[in-house]
Amino acid sequence: MEHTILKGRAFKFGDDISTDLIIAGKYASLRSNLPELAKHVMEDANPEFASKVQPGDFIVGGSNFGLGSSREHAPLVIKMAGVSAVLAKSFARIFFRNAINQGLPVLICDTDKIGEGDMLEVSLDEGVIHNVTKNEKYSFTRIPPAMLSILNEGGLIPYINKYGDFKW
């Protein structure tokens, strides 16, 4: 993802978006059918999200995004739905790590000025979010090189399959 600009619309959510809101427990039986599960991503937080999200779009949350049980399917189905990155003020630690392992960028930043539907351009290597709609720029905590290397390969498993070990 080096020198890559991610572009898409913002879908805004609030604080404390749990893994239960990302993937409702009533769909637990779909964990072996990830494409079907992805059709229900964020359904309990926004019933229209899965039908409106387009490749490249962003989820923009508040504080403590991804709290709850360790469901590695949560960031995976977000990615499968076409979301290019999740921006939030803070993340639950296990969700953050699962997202990186699944190849989904998670960016820590102040999301207050980003509105629903705003067009965003995100430069992972520069640590800058350009809100095209409002002509504003925001910074985010840059992704450490080791994690960026994992993201560049699409996740931890593809990284290990390619390199067999960590090489930074």
Image (cartoon, grey):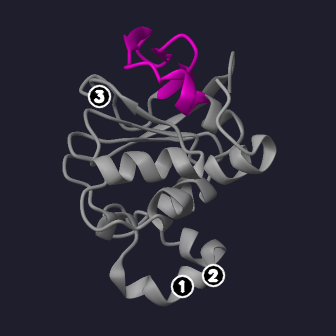
Quarter of the figure that contains the C terminus: top right
- Give the mark, 2 or 3, whose residue is nearer the N terminus: 2
Q: Amino acid at mark 2?
A: Asn
Q: Is residue 131 left or right of residue 148?
A: left
Q: Is residue 116 above or below residue 34?
A: above
Q: Is 131 contained in the magenta span?
A: yes
**Disc 2 crowd, CA 10 A, few/some/many (<14, 14-19, 20+):** few
At a point 46% along the width and 19% down the height, the residue shown is: 133
Residue 58 pos. (x, y %)? 49, 40
SS at badge 3: loop
Q: Amino acid at mark 1?
A: Leu
At a point 55% along the width and 59% down the height, the residue shown is: 76
Give the residues in magenta.
Answer: 119-148
Q: Is residue 1 left or right of residue 24?
A: right
**Residue corresponding to mark 2:** 33
Task: Compute the Cα span from label 1 to label 2.
Answer: 5 Å
Task: Compute the Cα span from label 3 to label 1.
Answer: 32 Å
Residue located farthest toward the right when viewing the structure as drawn: 162
**Residue corresponding to mark 1:** 30
Of residues 37 and 117, which is closer to you in this image?
37
**Residue corresponding to mark 3:** 111
Give the mark toward the camera: 3 or 1: 1
Quarter of the figure that contains the N terminus: top right
Q: Amino acid at mark 3?
A: Thr
